[in-house]
Each structure stands twice: as C-alpha cells, then as structure tokens.
Amino acid sequence: MSMATATIQTVERENYLNKEYGVGSWLFTTDHKRIALLYLISITFFFFIGGFFALLIRLELLTPAGDLVQADTYNKLFTMHGMVMVFFFLIPSIPAVLGNFLVPMMIGAKDLAFPRINLLSWYLYIIGGVMMMHCVLTGGVDTGWTFYTPFSTAFTNTKIVEAGLSIFVAGFSSILTGLNFVVTIHRMRAPGMTWSRLPLFIWAHYATSIIQILGTPVIAITIVLVAVERTLHLGIFDPKLGGDPLLFQHLFWFYSHPAVYIMILPSMGVVTEIIACFARKRIFGYSFVAFSSIAIAVFGFLVWAHHMFVAGISLYSALIFSLLSYAVAVPSAVKVFNWTATLYKGSIHYDAPMLYAFGFIGLFTMGGLTGLFLAALGIDVHVTDTYFVIAHFHYIMVGGALMGYLGGLHFWWPKISGRLYPESWARLAALIVFLGFNLTFFPQFVLGYLGMPRRYFHYPQEFQVLNVLSTAGATVLGVGYLLPMIYFLWSMRYGKPAPDNPWNAAGLEWMTSSPPTTFNFETEPVVTWEAYNYDELDKPRREEVKVVG
C-alpha cells in the first residue's frame, strides 16, 4: 500500500469518526466534552449499583435479627457498596465529568493537553468497572473496602485478586486524568489568564490532580502486593509468613486519606463558583481560598495514621498525627469562612444550584466538626469502628461530594445540554436530598456514640428505632437522587433551549455556545479582567434600573 493511499484512508476514517452522529464518533472521540458525557453515563450506572447495595444494607438493618440475608452475604454487601461507591463513583465523579467538560473552557483552551490519553483514561475506567461487575456477579468480596490484611491475604476465599486488579486498572485512569489536568492548566491557558485570574474551580482541580498523581501509585502498589502475597505466599503482610499487617494499613491509608480530598476538593471548587454567581459578588479572600486548596492537598498526605489510633502504633506517633489532623481542618475552615463572608450582604438568588451549595456547606461543616472528635485520641478509642465513623464519613463524602456534584450538574446543565430543566422540580429535589440525608445519617452518630459497631448485621433491640429512622431516611434520599435523573433526561427532549449564559455568570465557559462547539471558541479569548467580576457584569443592570427609576 502506497503512502498516499494510507494517508487517504486515514483521513477518511477520521472523517467518519468525527461525524456528528454514530456510535463510532463517541467511542473514538477525542473531544473532552464528549468524553465527559461518556463518564457521566458510566459513573451514573455505578452510582445506582452502589446505591442498590446500600438499599439492601438498610433493609437488613430494619430489624435487630439478621433475617434478610446471611452474615457472609451482608459482609459482601457492605464491601461491594464501599468499593463501587469509592473507586467508581466518588473519586472520579466531579474530575471526570465536570472537570473534563469545563477545565479547558474555563482556561480558554480548545481541549485538554492529551486528548487521546483522555479517551484512554475512560477506557481504563470502563475496563476496571467491567472487572468489578464480574467480581460482583461471581461471588463478590467480603473484606470491607479497606482489604485489611491478613484476612484479605490468608483467610477469605472471595474474589480479592480480581477486585484488587479492577481498582488497580481504574487507578491508572485517575492518574492519567490528573496528569492531563496539570499539563493543561500549566501550558494551555489563554493569553491574560494568569494564575491569579484562574477560577477557583481550576485551583481545586489542580490540587486534586496533585493528589491523584502522587497518591494513586501507592494504593496500586499496595494492591499488587496483596495479590502477590495471596498467590505466591510471600511474607509481606501476613505475620505467619514473617510479614507486617500494620505495613498494609500505613500504605493503604497513605493513599486513602488523601483520596478523601480527591472526592471533596472538586466539590469545594464547584461550590465556590456557585456562591459567587448566586451572591453576585467576588469571592472574599480569593488568594486564601486558592492556596487553601493546595494546603489541603499537602496536609492530606500527613494525617493517614489517625485511622490507626487503635491499631497498635506508638503513643508518640498517635499524638503527632492527632495534632496534624487538627491542622488539616484549618484550610477547610478557611473555605467555609470565606464562603460565608462572600454571602454577607450579597444579592442572593435561591436557585437550585445555590440550594445544593447551602446543603454542601451545612453537611460538610457537620462532617468536619465530627472529624475533630475522631482526631482526639480518647474519643477515637471509644467510637472507632462504630456507626459514628460511618456517619462522619458519609457527611463528608456523600453529603459533601455528592451535594457538590449535583450542584455542579444543575449549574452547568444548560451549558452541557443546551436545555433548561424545570426549576421548581430541581428545588424540590435539593430539599428532599438534604432532608433525606440528615434523616439517614444523623441517627448513626447517636448509634455510634451508644456503641453500635459497624459491619454487624445483628444488633440489640434498643437500637432498632434509630435504625428504622435511618432506613426511612435512605428511602427519602433515594427519591431525591432519582428526581434529577428523571428531569435531566426530560429536559433533553422537552426543556426550553438554554441561552449561552442563563445565570449571567462570570467565566470563559459562559462565553461559548450552549452546548459548546467542538473546539469551544471560534477565536482564542484574551482575558483582560479579574476573576469573578460580578460588579462589572451587574453594572449595566444597575444603570438600567437607575434610568427606569
């Protein structure tokens, strides 16, 4: 075959793949917006799979006796719930969906720095997800999502190696996404888009990407070591073989605590954008909010052992990690203070995205304050491995990360789909989610304080009322999660066409069409204004009001 013929065939193939419609145009696309939508579909699927496991858990806990499933099945339910939700929903949700869609547009770029690697990251995510679903359908795992050794390496007969490899593959997807964001933010900003003019959404994703790049290889290596010990019987973690089980916990939590910030930092970026828009004000203390994201990423790598206060580490180590755990709360508190200061005397609009932002602040603050109890050595000894920890984790991860994710979807949905959703239904859904979440997880704080251990499917009679409340709340919460999916799908066919900037928001992404064209901008934008210039955007309105008056 001649070089010319091969070139013609390559061009024809690319033209076919770049057609507006067709499966091939999606499966081989390098458009960051289409890849974001592929992630949206796949992540939503795993969210409902994980939610289904949660539903079965709550149904089992309606009664004190284990009368719905057997103990082994219950162990598999909470394990698969945790693994699917953490590794296939919470960690990739905002970076892979909203980050993929918005990062290039927010900095004035046509695409991410490595479009093909971006597509590869989605394929790796899908491969890992398929492996996880095969694991679920062929027996599952019963170790808990933490894979604690030596149980995971020497005692259980469930699908440890397969589940570990699925997370290993999905981890590379996370690393590639983080690498893509870092290079794009450094090298592809529009003229005039200095670091001090970057949207705080970008700062949050930059900090998140650092954690993804530096932390994810650690968990990947740890899971490989578990598989090696399990298959080759080498003494790495199993004390019978000369290994050290505490080594696994150190390696696992060195990644898994920073992973908390992979889940929560992007939500913080979303909430910042929403508050600035719906309060019609510049963000109070822009520099402090930006650098608090970097501080959270740095401190996140220094507090892993507060998960190990009762695991046998020395008292001196525990004291140091206790102090560091208090320190990591400071940059998070900076964000909450600055959001509150931004709202002060703002012209606040209570649209659905703003309701989710308020919900985020409330739930994240509750989760953060209860985290201070867990950082205290004496209290932590009492509530470790109780439902207090479950409630704290979910207030941060689900209440924080998911409220930010839903708020971001509502905020940018007109830009993503080119359609408007029904605002009244969206506000109702936000209210249902907030109420359902608190009814689900607040009773678990009380249960944990009273001493109910987590991971038990049988409990004393006196705990039943609180468990019934929690299950009822989970039912309400499920309705709140279903509503957005229904009206988002409805809006794609019946929703009113969205203007380019329905919120009159600041930011380059609102200067593109809805939905954006393939390369985002017709001409390269030149940034000559400061971030969050809402005083300038609202100036024509104020002058118009004066003229009418």
Image (cartoon, rainbow, N blue to C red):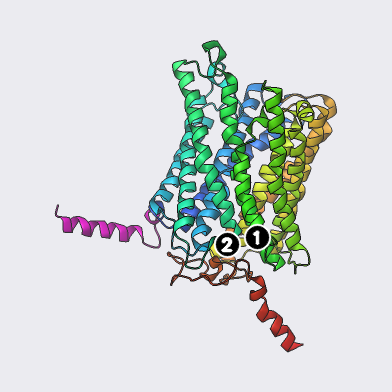
Is 188 magenta? The answer is no
Q: Residue at x 57, y 50 (%)?
A: 94
Q: Which mark is residue 478?
A: none
Query: How many neighbours does mark 2 have within 10 angstroms: few (below 14), some (14-19), or many (20 or more)?
Result: few
Q: Is residue 288 above or below residue 85?
A: below
On whether residue 19 falls in the magenta region, the answer is yes
Of all residues shown, which one is farthest toward the right? 462
Rendered location of residue 243, percent (x, y): 54, 16
The amino acid type of the residue labelled 1 equals Tyr
* Residue ID for mark 1: 286
Res 428 seen here: no
| Marks 1 and 2, how far apart at CA | 8 Å
Decide if residue 461 is on the left or right side of residue 211. Answer: right
Residue 514, image x and y in percent?
Answer: 53, 68
Query: Nearest the camera: 162 or 511?
Result: 511
Q: Quadrant of the C terminus?
A: bottom right
What crowding class fits label 1: few (fewer than 14 Cα within 10 Å), some (14-19), or many (20 or more)? Answer: some
View extreme (top): residue: 240
Q: Residue at x 46, y 47 (%)?
A: 179
- Total marks drawn? 2
Whether label 1 touches label 2, CB < 8 Å: yes
Extent of the magenta region: 1-25
- Which amino acid type is shown beneath numbered disc 2? Ser
Judged from the image, the secondary structure of the residue bearing numbered disc 2 is helix
